[in-house]
Amino acid sequence: MRQSRRGQVDPFIVMDVMEAAARAEAAGRDIIHMEVGQPSTPAPSGARAALARVLDQPLGYTVALGLPRLRQGIAALYRRWYGVDLDPARVVVTPGSSGAFLLTFSALFDAGDKVAIGAPGYPSYRQIMRAMSIQPVEMLTLAENRYQPVPDQIPADAAGLMLASPGNPSGTMLSLDAMRALIETAQGQGTAVISDEIYHGLSYGERCHTALEISDDVFIINSFSKFFSMTGWRVGWMVVPESHVRTVERIAQNMFICPPHASQVAALAALDCEGEARANLATYAENRRLMIQGLPQAGFTNFAPPDGAFYVYADVSDLTDDSRALAAEILDQAGVAVTPGLDFDSARGARTLRFSYARSTADITEGLARLRDFMARR
């Protein structure tokens, strides 16, 4: 059977690392997971209770854009967090943020269009675009710019610009002024702006800024996965300009019919559980402190301290020019799963590693101890 050229995307390497870690665990080894950006905490208790209450009721199709009460609740979140008055009609509930990317790219771009993305950056941006015959153009960001793009890097012929703040893998954030400069430059040359805000709510100083504080003419992508600890529930959302709502709705009807009804019920209840989610943030903050202190003690000294999310992205060029081999060595000899930077930066990722601190503080403490022992023996 033939295969399409556009289907030949690169693997998501962190998933390969997860699989190798799972094999090691199946063989009886104890593995500390620093590879995956997945909270170790469950969904909020209120979300789980809300789902339990409706399990005996029919959970069928919802309207394609999502439960009206959930869309209203998400709009209210923007008032609480950012002081933005958002029309719920512009909110689109999606099957995870991945579904939101598919809808966004389908609604905005045609085959052959160029879309600028920062490198290092979330790998699935590139691979989804390639699978849709869209051309990703990487902007090689610099450590001195905290791995965020600057306006003069935006290609003049780009149909779109992807922003991510906090970013994955760096955890660094754009200030409101820096975000405004990027958005105004892009819009001034007719480039559509997409802001990935999936890690909002997870910051350790200054609050995160949404692109909606600057412009209504942007696409926003977010999810219940990170702040609300609901990765496996597969429920995200978009905010789109009023002019694009019907286009997105038609695509969503045909691609997905609707987001999972059960997950939408839980997500609606999760919006009332911010206190529980913020308690998790306190754990991440302590984990971040331990990482910033412990990674240099283990020999990983070159990284920009993260402003948000739950990652540290380290330059390991003094240790290796093959981050995949180093990650495999760390897993095999230290029992710690970490992600090679090749996932995030095809040009320079062979010299970087990403460490996630989304797990429990006990796991992070043990993982750092294992890394110190490994590096002392190496």
Image (cartoon, rainbow, N blue to C red):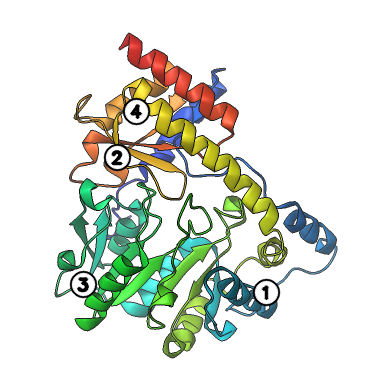
Determine the residue positioned at 79% across, 61% down. 50
Determine the residue positioned at 41% across, 68% down. 102
Which of the two labelled residues, at mark 3 and mark 4, occupies the earlier sequence position? 3
Which of the two labelled residues, at mark 2 and mark 4, occupies the earlier sequence position? 4
Amino acid type shown at disc 1: Tyr
The numbered mark at residue 61 is 1
Q: Position of residue 181 (x, y in %)?
A: 26, 72
Amino acid type shown at disc 4: Ala
Query: Which quarter of the image is occupied by the N terminus?
Result: bottom left
The crowd level at tag 2 (other Cα within 10 Å; few <14, some 14-19, many 20+) is: many
Asked whether the viewer can see residue 103, the reply is no
Please state if 185 lies on the left or on the right of 28 as rendered: left
Quickly name the residue at label 2. Answer: 341
Q: CA gap, disc 3 to disc 4?
A: 35 Å
Q: Secondary structure at mark 3?
A: loop
The numbered mark at residue 327 is 4
Q: Secondary structure at mark 2?
A: helix
User: In this rendering, is residue 101 above or below 91?
Assistant: above
Amino acid type shown at disc 2: Gly
Query: Which of 257/115 is in front?
Result: 115
Amino acid type shown at disc 3: Gly
